[in-house]
Amino acid sequence: MSDSFSAVKVTDRVYWVGAIDWELRDFHGYSVQRGSTYNAYLVLAEKIALIDTVKAPFFDQMLARIASVVDPAKVAYVIANHAEMDHSGALPQVIERLKPEKVIASNAGVKALADHFHLGQGITGVKDGETLSLGNAALSFVAAPMLHWPESMLTYLAEDRLLFSNDAFGMHLASSKRFADEIPEWILDYEASRYFANILLPYSALVTKLLDKVAKLGIAIDIIAPSHGPIWRPFRTPRVPSAPLRAGLQGPRGADPGWIASRYATWAAGPPTEKAVIVYDTMWHSTELMAHAIAEGVAAGGATASVMPLRGSHRSDVAQEMLGAGALLVGSPTLNNGMLPAVADVLTYLKGLKPRVGLGAAFGSYGWSGEAQAQMEEVLRAMNVELIREPLKVRYVPDQAALAECFALGQQVADRLKSQTAPAGS
Ligand code: FEO
C-alpha cells in the first residue's frame, strides 16, 4: 500500500497502526453512524510487539502504517487481546507475512482463535497477571472475561502507564483525530454512551468489577488505548495526574482516562434516572395517540418522557436512550395476532442487552383479537421489568376517556420514578 498511511505516535515507544473504517454503518445490528476504527498498536521495545490487528480487509492499511515506523519483519510478538474478527481478522495474514516469533492470547483466546482460523498449535496462552518481557519494557495481561467476549483480555505497558483496553472504553467513531482531547466532548459522550449501551450493557456488572480490579491492582494509568475510537490521554495537564484509574471517579477533568472511567462507572452501576422511555409503532395513529398521552402524563407528574416512534428510531437509538432510564413503556397495535415487526425487533434487541430498567407497561390499540399487548408484556417480564399495571388496551381509536387513562398511566409512572430515582440527565 502507498506511503499515504502512516503510524501515529502515542508515546515515545507506542504507535497507533490501526485502520479507519469510514464506510461502516452496521456492527452486528448496531447502527454506527460515524464509522469506526480498528486500533492496533506497535510497541517499539527491544522486542517489538503488535497489540491486536484489524478487520481482515484492512490488513494492507495496517501493514503500511507499521512500515512507516519499522520494518514489519521485526515484529516479534503479536498480542491478540480479543478473538472477535474486527480485531483478529487480519491475524492469519500477519502470521503469514510478518512471521512473528510468538502470537499470544489468553488461554480461552487460544481456543477461540483456533476455532476461527484453524491455525494449529501456533498460539501461546497466557494467564491473568502473567508478564511478557520485551527486553527494555514488559507487557502484563489482565483477564477481562465478557468485555466483550469470554476470552477478552487487556494488556498493560507499565513503562508508559498505558492500558491497551481492547473493546472497553472504546467507541465506534471514524475520525482523522486519534486522541479524545482532539474531539468535541459532546461527540465523545454521544458515541461512547451509544457504544456502551449497544455493546457492553449486558456486562455492566463485569465493567464495575473490572474498574475495581484495576483499582486494586494499583497500576497507574495515564493513557487508555482502546480497540475502537480515540485514545484517552491526560488532558490539559499532560502526564501530571498519573493516578490509578479509579481516581478519575472523583470527577471528570475532560476527555481523559478519568473522564471515560467515570462515565463507565455511572453507566454500569449508576442509579436509574426519572426518565421513562416510551417506544411504539403504530398502524392508524391510535397507539401513537396513546404514547403521546402517556408522555404528557409522565411530564405532568414531573418526570421525563422520551418518546421513540420506531418508524424513525433504530433499535440502537432506543438502546442508547434506555441507558439509565427508570421505566420502559412499549406500545403496539395488534397485527395478524401479534405485535408489529418493528416492536418485536426492538424488544428482542433490548431483551439481549438487559437494560437495568425497573418499571414498565405495555399498551396499544386493537380491533378484535388484541394479542400484541400480552406478548409485549411477556417480553417485559422476561426482562425482569416490574409491570406497573395490566396492559392498557384500546379498541380501534382512543376516545377522551381512553386518553385520560393513558395520561394517568404516565402520571403513575412518574410518581414511582420520582420516589425511587435520580433526576434524568445525570
Ligand atoms: Fe471490537 Fe468485541 O470486538
Image (cartoon, rainbow, N blue to C red):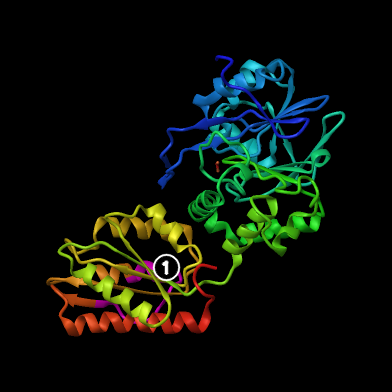
Q: Is residue 249 at all visible to an observer of this figure?
A: yes
The quarter of the picture where the N terminus appears is top right
Is residue 318 in the magenta section?
no
Q: Nearer the viewer, residue 143 or 330?
A: 330
Residue at numbered disc 1: 382
* Residue 141, x across and y down, in percent: 75, 42
Q: Nearer the viewer, residue 273 or 342?
A: 273
Horizontal side, residue 311 vs residue 184: left or right: left
Ligand 1 visible in quadrant: top right
Toward which corner of the image does residue 312 lie, by quadrant?
Answer: bottom left
> Helix or strand or loop: what does disc 1 sit on?
helix
Q: Given the image, on which type of amino acid does mark 1 rest?
A: Ala
* Residue 144, x across and y down, in percent: 67, 49
Horizontal side, residue 57 vs residue 243: left or right: left
Report the residue at 22% width, 71% height from top: 289
Q: Which residues are magenta?
A: 377-392
